[in-house]
Image (tube, rainbow, N blue to C red):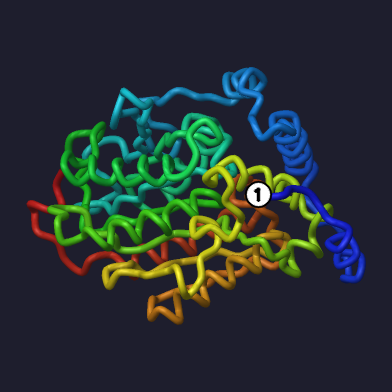
Amino acid sequence: MMETGSTSQEMEARASLPRPSPPVLPCAVQLQVTAFSAGIDALNRRDGTVNRGVYSVADRLLRVRANPRPDSSSVRSADFVVDASRGLWARVFSPAGAAAWARPSLPVVVYFHGGGFALFSAAQCYFDRLCRRLCRGIGAVVVSVEYRLAPEHPYPAAYDDAMDTLLFIDANGVPGLDDGVSVDLSSCFLAGESAGGNIIHHVANRWAATSTTSKSVRLAGLLSVQPYFGGEERTESELRLDGVAPIVNLRRSDFWWKAFLPAGATRDHPAAHVTDENAVLGTAFPPALVVVSGFDPLQDWQRRYTDVLRRKGKQVQVVEFPEGIHAFYLFPQLAASAEVIEDIRAFVESNRASSSTPESSTR
């Protein structure tokens, strides 16, 4: 059975490590980060459940509707249903009007939000705002997926929802686009941060195993921002930054893994612990961009993940933000938030399909 919290040995190990000063953040960001952390602790119950009553109140406060009217960056949004029986839907962000930013067809970015598999929504303002910035900054159509949450829907529900959304797009294209906006499904990228970064790894691996049956969608790359991986071992960064870095700590991380993983599983389950032995990657597994930050306790697991991909012969580009906290990209006030979108744009441009036929590019 998975245990949570810090043992005496972990506390001793943590005490022996040099402890950095907490990151210096703008006041507005610090207030939001503090609220994030307090809110998470209020939601995570000791019995392993999430207080959905309190969560629903916060969700209503943070939720924004799709808006067909373009914003100041000419980005509009619309929702579409993938499977109503399980509440699976997505929000698509696209350019308004026929110009489509002067491009004949746009790459597609299928995005999965973070939240430890247990929290947050594609409709909440932080992720809606981020997807608008990705849409305009990359020059892409962004599809943000509302997958089911743990612990009510544990492993592999999030992976199944992600895979079925890809299959829906493969069969139907991307709904909700203005006339004149076409997409290049041969340049489809999976994007995710934190738990979303975990989801896109496992779904890309599934898709690679079934890619011969795909008619339209070709996965051109992974955009993995601070992906959420782990194990029973406590890494140096987890111990050194526990209680120093905001948002993620050992107690919260252990809670999320327990909520998501099968009953009785440890953090060494292959969903969490990607190793040379359990990462059997198909030949069609796409190149990956992995973003790692200096104030993210998960950084050691992320570096190990990139090492596994390299040893498996996959293309990996690592971008480091030494002063970045977990989820820094959600805060436009931070300069690194704009920088990472530029890094993503460059990766997308360099990994797009070299050419596409009209049949594959217009959906």
Image height check: is 113 above or below 38? below
Residue 87 rendering spot, x and y as whole percentages? 38, 26
The residue wearing badge 1 is 1
Most foreground residue, 242 or 74: 242
Image height check: is 76 above or below 12? above
Residue 9 rendering spot, x and y as whole percentages? 86, 63
Residue drawn where x is 45% and y is 68% of the image = 278
Of the 4 image quadrants, the one containing the C terminus is top left
Image height check: is 324 above or below 65? below
- Near mark 1 (Cα within 10 A), the count class, few <14, some 14-19 or many ≥20, is few
What amino acid is found at the position of numbered circle 1 in the picture? Met
Most foreground residue, 45 or 180: 45
Image height check: is 217 above or below 182? below
Q: Is residue 308 left or right of residue 69?
A: right
Most foreground residue, 103 or 244: 244
Residue drawn where x is 70% and y is 32% of the image = 47
Residue 254 rendering spot, x and y as whole percentages? 68, 48
Q: Is residue 129 left or right of residue 210?
A: right
Most foreground residue, 246 or 9: 9
Classify mark 1: helix, strand or loop.
loop
Residue drawn where x is 17% and y is 39% of the image = 172
Q: Residue 36 is drawn in which quadrant?
A: top right
Numbered label tally: 1
Residue 206 rendering spot, x and y as whole percentages? 32, 57
